[in-house]
Image: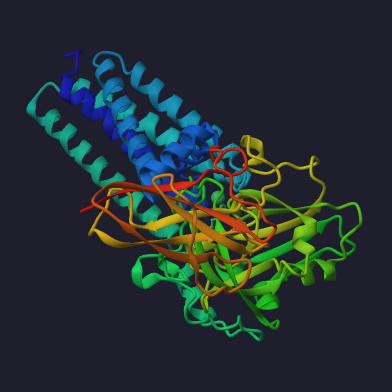
């Protein structure tokens, strides 16, 4: 018998790929989770994805974009495996070629990851070898099966391989998760700032009628990052290096930060990829130390103008040094959010928070390296992908009620939402219905000028469909522009509107 049945051929392709992925995942359990060729290829895909497509993915899938990417990759590989198997009904060459190509792809991806050392390459090499050898072996065994005895041998072999791949891959997953970051976070315990933020006054939000709560609970804080797997960095293993254009290089560990008098500040963070009316804005009490104090300790040299920060996963941001050093702005190296250590997804053990700047130029999570440098000399992650090098948050506003396409009873209709003009403060919020005259909204109590300001106002409306529009005016007298621009390159503008029905 020298031609394999279709089902057997496809099965061999799938099993060989499973063995390859499992072997890589297992070895990655030892040398670093992101060395798993599957994840390395996924991360490379994220970094290479054209910005427009990535925006689309984030908008369409929300935080599920990463699951969708991994699922899509899984199905694609499965498809290739089946096709390569079917093409190998006589000669094993197509299958071997696929195993080789996938293996080489994994090797290239791992070698190009900014967060992996050279030894990580043994993970995709293990994949390559496992893929090639298991395919070769299964293929020759299947071709040899001429009687029931060899048929059983093949079935046993395939079953064993499937189970083995599952067990080894699972073990790799277990090893990757063995870095006990939750334990480390629990050991840090609650954080008591020496200088707490002023208590949030009553009347700072209209959450009872549908705006967000003034402080966003940690579990509801928006999340945006490129990390396919959240970095698991224990406080015990964390080090921060401060170098570049400084007089003295500093190397700090977690205790060096936690044991200082901590400050707490109430800050609204915003993502540049937020569309007009979008959800990527949240407010928290951040605890940490002033970045300014830390940099003064290192001694900043006069020609530095950029603070270049790097995450443990290789992601980078560049922040104007004058903003970092501005005492009124109060940029933080933060280790806590709302009294707890930072949640793992929000940067445990330490991140940057710089009020008034979009997150992509300022809010590095899992930060491990701060380099004083110059703009133009070193470019950062999103700058390399076409976004602006400098990005202060734009004055914007959003309608939260009535939601678009809601139906509300006729009579007094309340329109409410949020507005923000970080660093300057919101002076006024104006709302109009169906292009009518602008009406000034009631503003909630101001907390500080680095946070959002909630607003509400009421209109008498007759049955029918109506459109509410909102604009904020900041304390510099700047009235939010109605010119619609997309998030790229430095943040969306335009008035948010809500179309709803009155009955
Ligand atoms: N390491 C790392 N830090 C990062 C990012 C990232 O992709 N990787 N994204 C940034 C962006 S674009 C934003 S808006 C904020 C979001 O922080 P959050 O997820 O805690 O809300 O984190 C910033 N810090
Ligand atoms: Mo962002």
Q: Looking at the image, is 393 positioned above or below residue 142?
A: below
Residue 152 percent coordinates (x, y): 12, 34
| Quadrant placement of the C terminus | bottom left
Residue 354 in sight: no
Question: Toward the viewer: 295 or 452?
Answer: 452
Question: Toward the viewer: 57 or 267?
Answer: 267
Which residue corresponds to the image point at 45% horizontal and 72% vertical from the top-left? 205
Q: Looking at the image, is 446 positioned above or below residue 100?
A: below
Which residue corresponds to the image point at 67% horizontal and 66% vertical from the top-left? 239
Determine the image quadrant of residue 102: top left
Q: Looking at the image, is 191 positioned above or below residue 503?
A: below
Q: Residue furthest left?
A: 148
Residue 60 percent coordinates (x, y): 37, 41
Determine the image quadrant of residue 492: top right
Residue 362 percent coordinates (x, y): 65, 55
Which residue corresponds to the image point at 53% horizontal and 43% vertical from the top-left? 494
Question: Toward the viewer: 38 or 218?
Answer: 218
Determine the image quadrant of residue 369: bottom right
Question: Toward the viewer: 187 or 29?
Answer: 187
Image region (quadrant) for ligand 1: bottom right
Residue 465 in sight: yes
């Amino acid at each position: 018998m020298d031609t394999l049945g279709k089902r057997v051929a496809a099965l061999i392709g799938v099993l060989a790929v499973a063995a390859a992925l499992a072997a890589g995942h297992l070895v990655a359990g030892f040398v670093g989770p992101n060395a798993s060729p599957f994840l390395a290829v996924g991360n490379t895909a994220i970094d290479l994805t054209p910005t427009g497509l990535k925006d689309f993915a984030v908008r369409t899938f929300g935080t599920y974009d990463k699951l969708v990417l991994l699922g899509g990759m899984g199905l694609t590989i499965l498809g290739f495996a089946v096709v390569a198997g079917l093409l190998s009904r006589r000669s094993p060459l197509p299958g071997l070629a696929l195993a080789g190509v996938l293996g080489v792809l994994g090797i290239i991806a791992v070698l190009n990851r900014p967060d992996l050392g050279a030894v990580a390459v043994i993970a995709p090499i293990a994949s390559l070898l496992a893929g090639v050898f298991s395919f070769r072996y299964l293929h020759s065994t299947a071709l040899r099966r001429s009687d029931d005895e060899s048929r059983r041998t093949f079935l046993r072999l395939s079953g064993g391989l499937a189970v083995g791949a599952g067990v080894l891959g699972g073990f790799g997953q277990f090893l990757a998760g063995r870095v006990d970051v939750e334990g480390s976070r629990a050991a840090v315990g609650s954080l008591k700032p020496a200088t707490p933020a002023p208590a949030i006054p009553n009347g700072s939000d209209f959450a009872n009628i549908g705006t967000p709560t003034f402080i966003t609970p940690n579990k509801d804080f928006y999340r945006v990052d490129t990390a396919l797997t959240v970095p698991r960095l224990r406080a015990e293993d964390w080090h921060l290096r401060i170098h570049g254009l400084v007089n003295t290089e500093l190397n700090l560990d977690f205790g060096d930060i936690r044991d200082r008098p901590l400050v707490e500040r109430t800050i609204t963070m915003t993502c540049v990829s937020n569309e007009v009316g979008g959800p990527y804005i949240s407010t928290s009490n951040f605890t940490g130390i002033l970045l300014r104090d830390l940099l003064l300790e290192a001694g900043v040299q006069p020609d530095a103008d950029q603070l270049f920060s790097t995450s443990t996963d290789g992601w980078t941001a560049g922040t104007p040094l004058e903003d970092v050093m501005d005492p009124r702005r109060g940029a933080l190296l933060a280790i806590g959010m709302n009294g707890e250590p930072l949640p793992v997804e929000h940067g445990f053990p330490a991140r940057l928070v710089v009020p008034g700047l979009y997150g992509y130029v300022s809010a590095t999570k899992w930060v491990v390296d701060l380099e004083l440098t110059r703009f133009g000399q070193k470019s950062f992650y999103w700058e390399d992908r076409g976004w602006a090098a400098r990005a202060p948050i734009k004055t914007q506003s959003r309608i939260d009620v009535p939601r678009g396409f809601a139906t509300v009873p006729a009579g007094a209709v309340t329109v409410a939402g949020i507005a923000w003009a970080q660093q300057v403060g919101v002076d006024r919020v104006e709302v109009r219905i169906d292009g009518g005259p602008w009406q000034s909204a009631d503003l909630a109590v101001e907390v500080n000028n680095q946070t959002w300001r909630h607003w509400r106002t009421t209109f008498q409306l007759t049955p029918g469909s109506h459109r509410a529009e909102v604009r904020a005016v900041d304390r510099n007298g700047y009235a939010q522009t109605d010119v619609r621009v997309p998030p790229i390159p430095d943040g969306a503008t335009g008035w948010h509107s809500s179309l709803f029905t009155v009955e």
